[in-house]
Amino acid sequence: MKQFSVLFADPDKNVHDGHRRMIKALKPSWSLVFASTAREAMSKIVILRPDVIVSELGLTLEDGSDLLKTVQQAFPEIIRIVLSSEPDGESEVVLRATQSAHRFLAKPCKGEALVEQIEKAGGLRRLLKSKELLEIIGGIPYLPSLPTIFHELVEAIESPLTSLSEIGDIIARDVSMTGRVLHLVNSAFFGLPRQVSNPQTAVVMLGINVIKSLVCYVKLFFAAPDVIMPGLSLDQMWLHSSLAARLSKEIAANCNAPANVQENAFLAGMLHDVGKLLLLDHPRYYNRVLRPLSESSEKVFSEAEYATFGTSHAEIGAYLLGLWGLSDQVVEAVACHHRPSQLNFESSVVLRATHLANALLCMAAGENFLVDSTIMADPCVKKSFAGWKKRAETLYRESVNEAKSSAG
């Protein structure tokens, strides 16, 4: 397992002593650095470039800027973890902090839990920097940038003074994005009781994070090149992604996940196959993967990818979302939705929900798809699996009937 250099930023020096004893007992070879102020932390980061920063909430530099947000902008490769005494994990200040942190942990935190989170975040980054993955990424002519509108949305969401109507106004400034988002919002998938004619209403009716996921998907979906591949339909991809988003959120809710985790499950479900869109710019990839598929009706697309390239569209899509700065929960779920056990840690609720939603919808479509055995062993999954399977079949059947009626 990799050895990490970790900087702890906390104004309480007693906390420093506790971290020093705790980590040295578990990982004696790790390099530890400590800072009591945001300014001291930044000075040490500039010189030492640690792998990880573990920071208390609310540390700010002299100009009032947040420490973790500054680190995110200046040193995006550093893993950022919040270790906070804030009692309410759903509080506004915590939810804003998670926009610039990879992970959030509450005090008191056992040393084993902190070490696991550091190693898990580091493992995800190694997965997304594998030689095989980077070779495929290098063959894609360009990686799309995060929509400007998304940056504005995140900034607006972080401000407690921004209303839902004002967030809708941000979307409305992009005429092309507005039209496409409203088209999706008014599709049968959302089943809204009335036609939505403006983004302000869409934000109120669907919620901010649903709109964020649609903005990301629209950016990627409509930027995809007009390339026709046998067995690959953009319409089918949209349908599958939208159903996966819906089912993934329902599964997370059934497992009593908090609201922000349910929203991340929706976002991961919506974006889990974005790697396929990126690969449309790499036709040789599809040609080499589809060849063994035509020879074996038993092999699924992702298995053919791993057999041919040692990586898949899952890791490729996650690589882009990681560059975009989406949360680790979402990036991890997208990267591992076919192979949840590849990080060798207990899977998150978001990953479990995304894997299950994708698998169950593929089964409903008649594909030969197996659910990961470690996920099947989860008590919540055991209890609810049959019901989720029926739900997936219902969603798929309704979508097929809707498509037929629209065509007719």
Image (tube, rainbow, N blue to C red):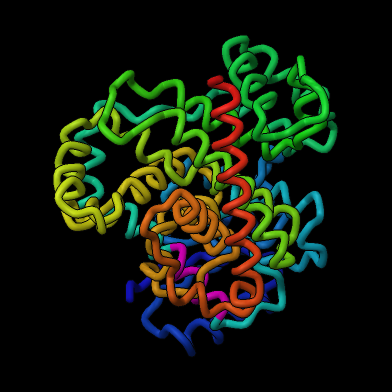
Q: Who is closer to the viewer here, 10 or 112?
A: 112
Residue at position x 69%, y 67% from top?
255
Residue at position x 57%, y 53% from top?
393
| Magenta stretch, residue numbers | 113-121
Using residue 84 as the reference point, say whether residue 293 is left or right of it: left
Q: In the rendering, at what x and y percent does residue 311 appear? A: 26, 53
Residue at position x 57%, y 60% from top?
353
Q: From the image, which quarter does the C terminus lie in?
A: top right
> Does residue 391 lie above or below 152 as drawn?
below
Q: How many marks?
A: 0
Q: Who is closer to the viewer here, 120 or 290?
A: 290
Residue that extends furthest to the front in the rendered view of this protein: 408
User: Quick check: can you spot residue 362?
Assistant: yes
Q: From the image, which quarter does the N terminus lie in?
A: bottom left
Q: In the rendering, at what x and y percent does residue 79 appear? A: 48, 57
Residue that extends furthest to the bottom in the rendered view of this protein: 25
Is 92 magenta? The answer is no
> Does residue 243 lie above or below 86 as drawn?
above
User: Quick check: can you spot residue 39?
Assistant: no
Q: Quadrant of residue 14?
A: bottom right
Using residue 230 as the reference point, say whether residue 384 is left or right of it: right
Dominant SS type (magenta): helix
Using residue 35 as the reference point, say whether residue 107 is left or right of it: right
Q: In the rendering, at what x and y percent does residue 62 appear? A: 68, 42
> Does residue 152 lie above or below 247 as drawn?
above
Residue at position x 64%, y 46% from top?
246
Q: In the rendering, at what x and y percent does residue 264 appear? A: 62, 50
Q: Quadrant of residue 225?
A: top left
